[in-house]
Image: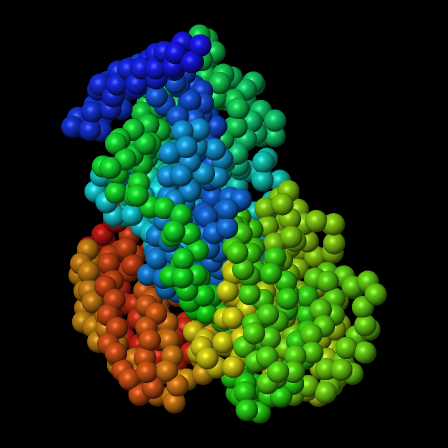
Amino acid sequence: MRIIYSLIFLSCFSSITCAQRTLDTLPFRDTSLSLEERVKDLIARLTLEEKVQLMKHESPAIPRLGIPAYNWWNEALHGVARTPEKVTVFPQAIGMAATFDTEALRKMGDITSSEGRALFNEALKAGKGIAQYRGLTYWTPNINIFRDPRWGRGQETYGEDPFLTARMGSAIVRGLEGDNPHYLKAVACAKHYAVHSGPEHNRHSFDARPSLFDLWDTYLPAFRELVTKAKVHGVMCAYNRLEGQPCCGNDPLLVDILRNQWRFDGYVTSDCWAVSDFTSFHKTHANNTVAASDAMLAGTDLECGNLYQLLAEGVQKGLHSERDINVSVTRLFTILFKLGMFDPQDQVPYASIGREVIECDAHKQHAYRMAQESMVLLKNEKQLLPLKESKVKRIALIGPNADNGHTQLANYFGTPSEIITPYMSLKKRFGDKIKIDYYPGTEIIKMLDNAPSFAQIASEAKKADVIVFVGGISADYEGEAGDAGAGGYAGFASGDRTTMNLPPVQIDLMKALKKTGRPLVVVNMSGSVMNFEWESRNADAIIQAWYGGQAAGDAIVDVLFGQYNPAGRMPLTTYKSDDDLPPFESYSMENRTYRYFKGEVRYPFGYGLSYTTFTYDKVDCVSKVQTGKRIQVSVTVRNTGKRDGDEVVQLYVTHPQSANIRIPLCALKGFQRIHLKAGESRQVTFTLFPEDLALTDVKGNLIENAGEVELFMGGGQPRYVSGSTAKLEITGEAYQIY
């Protein structure tokens, strides 16, 4: 019997080996052929039914062709997300935006794709297909504009400014996708295209109707830059409608602009079950078969959902042809080939990345660095900070986020092996040298059960040298509809916020602490801005700490005690009152963000304090430039203080205002984060291109016109910080960028 079994095994093994050899001889496996030839050969071997199944995010295996199962859905917003394995977790995207550090973000993307590659390589070698959250097609970055601080998902973005968003988004694309000329390390995906910035409760039926001016001035520039310059390989269309047409079936967006104007040749995926919304919520289509057909014909190549199986029926009904389907399948397989899925692994430069990179020391150190860089010092009365270890013997550490690692992870998160909270960092760092009296005091939005009263906590806090209150909110309350907004508490709705105020229970606790007379430091964790109405008047110092990832606690303590000199900058405007905000559902940019808000603000976009001081010499640039020409603008920055530190050099362009057309009050057109030792100086140079000096007209055209503009270079916006200005005269005929 052993002989018989051996013969059977050898026969089976021989059959498998022969089958593999046969597959290896097929043209689409031949790496000497062009990518186009290989993809064309593979598609020619697929049946119609196989093709439509491969156009769903959960794509089945095709064993006869050696095509493994592949799930396109993966997330990497601030590190590899939603995997059961332990991975490195960075600050939430809005916190990374506060770094104003494109190189740090590019490196974060590179680290993330390395850890993702390790998990992918392992799954590919196992031969069981690529399951959800194991693939290399990451549905990130979110480059929607954080136009309104109430939007719960704004934390996933890079803030309110199109220029900052475009540069930070491009950086993570470069980091994720790599720089190999033949293979992609991973695939980034610019989302949600387009005009998708809340509210969350009606996102599946909402019809956004911005003006052409706002569409091209605010909502599309970041997408344009990622597609035309960063060469991102994926785009995700949004849930909402734009001008009455669902974004995932929107011909102007997907055909006219994305494919024809911007020449995008990558793949488009729907947001999850967005195509189902055509019939269920938008009511724009008679049935799901027509909905699937229209989405595919508009250029949505992949459906996150289960309706694209109806595309075969659509061929039978004459709604589209198999040739139309081939266009999308070609785009999808081009991506998979570029990832090296059908090539010998010794030819794929990223195939050797193994588990040893996951949570390695270098990766954890970079998460720590980005947490440090994200910290924004908003107030520092009488230079209370940094605290002096020699003078602080007792700290009252109070607040719901003082020892809440979950809050630090934000949404769309992975899970690290260790999360360092502020309480853990203080205990680890100082041991018995400084006594730490820790009281959560409250939950984020309500009183704690069986906890000491506020009066009792204040009585104990009075014994301390300083009170550090670590409060804010969490992604349990602000975030994506369905994931956040739990409990229906006041101040939150379906993941969005209804007020910029801190939950009242936390304000009440801080009022009790204020009465002690002890110095009060407020550390705020949130993905959006608070108005800090009470805090700005009563706290001695305020640190905006965002959701800082696994190392946030260490970064916060570093700032508190001066081991790190903060230099983060606000990627958002901090308004004084909810009354300053226009209606949430209005997508007009009138009186929104620093570019168009004309009222007084609490803390402006680009704002952040330091423990040292910087001065700016005279701006060095030509006095005149012809339309269509680029110029260089330079300034020398000096650290005039006694501490080493970072400075975020910002370049703003200001055009004369007009009563007839809307013109930004000023606009960020360059930024660079630099490190200067005490007494050190450095020249910083930016290149201004015609599009940086141009303005959007009412029809959405970007045109550079003759006239005079003012240039400002400083550590923040003009009017709010000292810096250096220069006048620039633009001469010549009108020059249209697009």
In this rendering, position of residue 631 left or right of residue 405: left
In this rendering, position of residue 219 left or right of residue 413: left
* Residue at image coords 52%, 41%: 208
How did the renderer colour the structure? rainbow
* 553 in relation to 116, above or below: below
* 470 in relation to 76, above or below: below
Locate residue 381: give its quadrant: bottom right
Asked if residue 269 shows in the view, the reply is no
* 22 in relation to 39, above or below: above
Quadrant holding the C terminus: top left
Could you say which is closer to the camera, residue 268 or residue 736?
A: 268
* Residue at image coords 52%, 81%: 561
Q: How many marks?
A: 0
Q: Position of residue 18 (x, y in %)?
A: 28, 15
Q: Position of residue 475 (x, y in %)?
A: 61, 54
Locate residue 581: give its quadrant: bottom right
Asked if residue 559 shows in the view, the reply is yes
* Residue at image coords 27%, 35%: 345
Could you say which is closer to the camera, residue 717 or residue 305?
A: 305
Q: Position of residue 88 (x, y in %)?
A: 46, 55
Residue at the farthest bottom position: 391
Quadrant holding the N terminus: top left
Could you say which is closer to the camera, residue 19 or residue 676?
A: 19
In this rendering, position of residue 392 left or right of residue 138: right
* Residue at image coords 48%, 39%: 133
Could you say which is closer to the camera, residue 186 or residue 728?
A: 186
Q: Position of residue 716 (x, y in %)?
A: 41, 73
